Image (tube, rainbow, N blue to C red):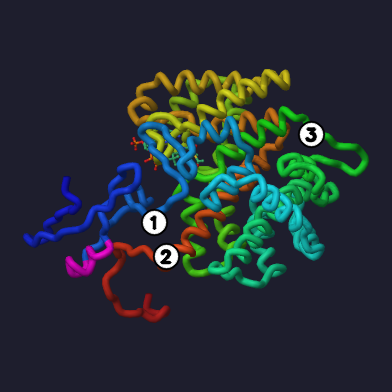
Amino acid sequence: MSDKAIIEVNGERIELPIEIGTEGEKAIDIKKLRVLTGGLITLDPGFKNTGSCKSKITFLDGEKGILRYRGYALEDLAENSTFLEVAYLIIFGELPTKIEFDKFIKTIKSYTMINEEMKDIIDGFPKSAHPMGILSSLTSALTAFNPQSVNIEDEEEMYQAICKTLAKIPVLAAWAHKKNLGEPLNYANNQVGYIENILEMMFKIPTEPYKPNPIVVNALDQLLILHEDHEQNCSTSTVRLVGSSHAGMFASISAGVSALWGPLHGGANQAVIEMLEDIAKDGGDVEKYINKAKDKNDSFRLMGFGHRVYKNFDPRARIIKKSADEVLADLGIEDPILEIAKKLEKVALQDEYFVKRKLYPNVDFYSGIIYRALGIPTEMFTVMFAIGRLPGWIAQWREMRLNNEPIGRPRQLYVGEKLRKFVPINKR
Ligand code: ACO
């Protein structure tokens, strides 16, 4: 098999190398294309067919529905590991030993305090502000309180910065929620686990003791594992791109939070529940909404369906669907929205439009349902996703910097006006 691609431009043959990944994936290396062809670039809006980097973190096969972190199957990790252990694996490349893991947890706990002046910033937001907007701003504001930029060559410095990020962002996420509720902000509780602490900071009120339901803790832990990384998705590519200008980790992650917020990306989990609620309010006519989604003159899309890379099934959706059924049964929840979700799923999976385009329920279709069952308010769904994706963003940022990747700067095909002469305003 040839390890070169040959393209012909204006009768001239140009050879480009083909790179092969560890799982046999192939990529044409086009770095020299422009030079060799006297200015030809590739055009690929949405980067549907463009590899932006080489990465050792996550392997994904969209046709076969495979997702692996550092070589471990997602199903294996979701069944047997915990969010923080998987975070360590994703960021540092190997599962931690007991000593390494104890140190990791202890160091994260040592950074859970937030500068009190951050509360002044939160005070400035209206109560109605979306928690994703608050989280993005607060993450960026952390730069002001942690001014030293990290020396990525210094392992210990990087380690401390990583633990700091994992410690502080869940506190800010919980504070964004408390701001919406108008309730006092909770400090972290280092006596409990990472997931328990997130729930406690979000839901504890000063007048009552708080003990999270272990079913909720376990379900959330698993849910966050499923979200930890997903190779070069929109928010992760954003983090890498922003970081490629050597912007710091907090600034890059803040940009990632904003990218995740969009309804075509992480914001879909909120959009799914809102869509299901709208269908319920409208009398539960699922067919009507399927038809709207198929109508090319209607901008409506079935939220939680379709994926850029999964064209068979989303392995995260498979795990989460099973977990959603178990959690709803364990918690004894009967949610009318769930009935609509099931009907929608059944109809869409049989409808030719969806089958032909390989549009299957994605992770967000079920995660909204499960978050709702766990008592997480709808506006916080995407914030929970951001907490889950944090290890992935950190790992990808670190890898990009350690690989010494050049600044990200795509090219374009200009299709605007040709040169024209300025016309003074009184002559236009
Ligand atoms: N409902 C109806 N039609 C759809 C949907 C949908 N949810 N998704 C894709 N299609 C159709 C498109 O109209 C297009 O049809 P056409 O070929 O007749 O023009 C075809 O399927 C291909 O769609 P694209 O938009 O080209 O696919 P792309 O890979 O660019 O988009 C995306 C993927 C953004 C996820 C899309 O499927 C979508 O908008 N889904 C709904 C939002 C969503 O659930 N996002 C969460 C993704 S998972 C995550 O981010 C964690």
Query: x%, y% of residue 51?
Result: 35, 52
Residue topped by disc 3: 212
Disc 1 from disc 2: Cα separation: 8 Å
Residue 100: within the magenta? no
Asked where in the image residue 150 lies, by quadrant, the reply is bottom right
What amino acid type should be assigned to the residue bearing mark 3? Pro
Disc 3 from disc 2: Cα separation: 43 Å
Residue topped by disc 2: 405
Q: Nearer the viewer, residue 315 or 371?
A: 315
Query: x%, y% of residue 99?
Result: 67, 49
Tag 2 or tag 3, which sits nearer the N-term?
3
- The residue under the point 59% across, 39% down is 225
Q: Residues within 10 Å of mark 3 (few under 14, many from 20)?
A: some
Image: magenta residue range: 31-39
Residue 38: within the magenta? yes
Tag 3 or tag 1, which sits nearer the N-term?
1
Q: Along the horizontal axis of the image, is 175 left or right of 20?
A: right
What amino acid type should be assigned to the residue bearing mark 2? Glu
Quadrant showing the N terminus = top left
Q: Please tell me whether mark 1 sits on a helix, a strand or a loop.
A: loop
Is residue 157 in view from this perspective?
yes
Q: Residues within 10 Å of mark 2 (few under 14, many from 20)?
A: some
What amino acid type should be assigned to the residue bearing mark 1? Cys
